[in-house]
């Protein structure tokens, strides 16, 4: 597969650094399976769906996973080192993998101090530039410390341009996030759904269900040749409950559509469906990688944001709609100055 098919040029000024205000006022590009395009608003979403259709949301909660700390001097002649740590993957109640700067000045056995009584020891340095941390706190105490001292882990293309602040605590978290804070990136299509829009969805007779996929920073990493060859991505933990699987199977049997909100919800469903299109409950890791030519069996339409060129997420939407249609849609979006990426505008894809 030639990755150049999935590239496009995006003017830097179209990368959204803040969401629309209010967040349901973002623009919406409706992309039809025959290539037709409609420019509208996220608030118009309900009129493109029918009573009985089911929107499927990812209710994962984003952890304030960006930390600032200090590595104390190793001896009397040494110096303290200021550190930036971004948690990437939870290993257990006490341990996380993380990215850290300055990575070259940190080694196994070092301690990083984030606040009084809140420290972590570097316990490993696996391949790929990450470190492994064992915190002085665990479980709910660790979560509370991260809430108190961490910042929202904004995507790299935003974090390079501005620091996270108090506003991001609200705008980079969905209104329906559950209690289990384990994601280090938001399921960003869900950020458009204000209480007002959710009420309008309900009033239109469109049903809502939730799945859970804990989003990792792997979603922002460039694709590697080995991933293309193996047709597998980084692993992310996901859950589809028996009750939700049964509900979605019944809806489709009744002729209604299943509409994931975001690529994480879509990946969850497509990792739990059999060749006959029947969804089965599952809990655990998935490394599913959807690309053109792969069967899409559990998704009848998709709400999603605009994705990075050459990314697995752009390949996923091409798998659903076709590469030519999505390249034309993105060219239209760029020409009409839609706002891109996590805080940007949205698409409704109707195969």
Image (cartoon, helix red, strand yellow):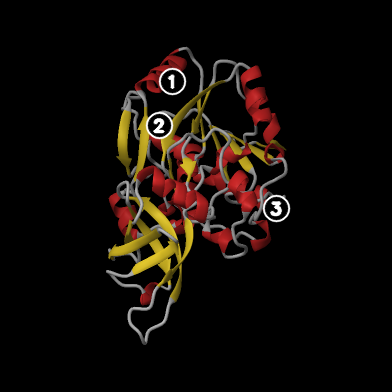
The answer to whether the residue labelled 1 contacts the one labelled 2, judged by CB atoms less than 8 Å apart, is yes
The answer to whether the residue labelled 3 contacts the one labelled 1, judged by CB atoms less than 8 Å apart, is no
Mark 2: give few (<14), some (14-19) or many (20+) Cα within 10 Å: many
Foreground residue among 193 and 69 = 69
Residue assigned mark 2: 269
- Dot 3 or dot 1: first in sequence order is 1
Residue assigned mark 1: 248
Foreground residue among 57 and 287 = 57
Is residue 323 rendered to the left or right of residue 228?
A: right
Q: Residue at x 56, y 61 (%)?
A: 159
Furthest residue toward front: 116
- Dot 2 or dot 3: first in sequence order is 2
Estimate the x, y position of residue 194 in percent, counting from the top left: 65, 33
Against 88, is 195 above or below?
A: above
Q: Residue at x 38, y 17 (%)?
A: 246
Q: Is residue 184 visible?
A: no
- Dot 1 or dot 2: first in sequence order is 1
As helix, strand or loop, the secondary structure at mark 2 comes to helix
Q: Is residue 22 visible?
A: yes
Is residue 162 rendered to the left or right of residue 53?
A: right
Estimate the x, y position of residue 301 in percent, counting from the top left: 53, 30
Residue assigned mark 3: 335
Q: Measure the C-alpha gap from mark 3 to mark 1.
A: 37 Å
Estimate the x, y position of residue 188 in percent, counting from the top left: 55, 43
Q: Measure the C-alpha gap from mark 2 to mark 3.
A: 33 Å
Mark 1: give few (<14), some (14-19) or many (20+) Cα within 10 Å: many
């Amino acid at each position: 597969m030639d990755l150049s098919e999935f590239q496009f040029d995006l003017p830097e000024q179209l990368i959204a650094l803040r969401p629309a205000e209010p967040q349901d006022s973002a623009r919406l590009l409706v992309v039809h399976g025959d290539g037709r395009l409609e420019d509208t608003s996220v608030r118009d979403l309900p009129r493109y769906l029918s009573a009985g259709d089911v929107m499927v949301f990812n209710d994962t909660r984003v952890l304030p996973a960006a930390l600032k700390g200090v590595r104390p001097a190793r001896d009397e002649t040494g110096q303290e080192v200021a550190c930036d740590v971004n948690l990437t993957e939870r290993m257990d109640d006490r341990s996380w993998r993380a990215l850290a700067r300055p990575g070259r000045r940190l080694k196994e056995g070092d301690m990083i101090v984030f606040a009084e009584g809140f420290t972590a020891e570097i316990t490993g340095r696996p391949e790929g530039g990450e470190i492994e941390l064992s915190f002085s706190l665990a479980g709910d105490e660790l979560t509370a410390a991260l809430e108190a001292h961490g910042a929202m882990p904004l995507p790299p293309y935003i974090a390079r341009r501005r620091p996270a602040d108090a506003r991001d605590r609200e705008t980079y978290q969905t209104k329906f996030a559950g209690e289990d804070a384990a994601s280090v990136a938001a399921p960003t299509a869900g950020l458009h759904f204000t209480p007002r829009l959710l009420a309008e969805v309900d009033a239109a007779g469109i049903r809502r269900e939730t799945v859970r996929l804990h989003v990792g920073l792997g979603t922002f990493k460039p694709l590697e040749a080995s991933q293309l060859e193996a047709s597998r991505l980084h692993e992310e933990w996901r859950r589809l409950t028996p009750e939700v699987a049964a509900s979605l199977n019944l809806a489709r049997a009744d002729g209604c559509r299943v509409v994931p909100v975001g690529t994480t919800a879509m990946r969850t469903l497509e990792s739990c469906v059999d060749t006959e299109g029947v969804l089965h409950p599952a809990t655990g890791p998935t490394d599913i990688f959807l690309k053109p030519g792969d069967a899409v069996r559990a998704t009848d339409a998709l709400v999603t944001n605009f994705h990075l060129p050459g990314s697995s997420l752009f390949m996923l939407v091409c798998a659903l709609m076709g590469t030519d249609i999505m390249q034309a849609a993105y060219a239209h979006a760029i020409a009409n100055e839609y706002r891109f990426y996590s805080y940007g505008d949205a698409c409704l894809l109707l195969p």
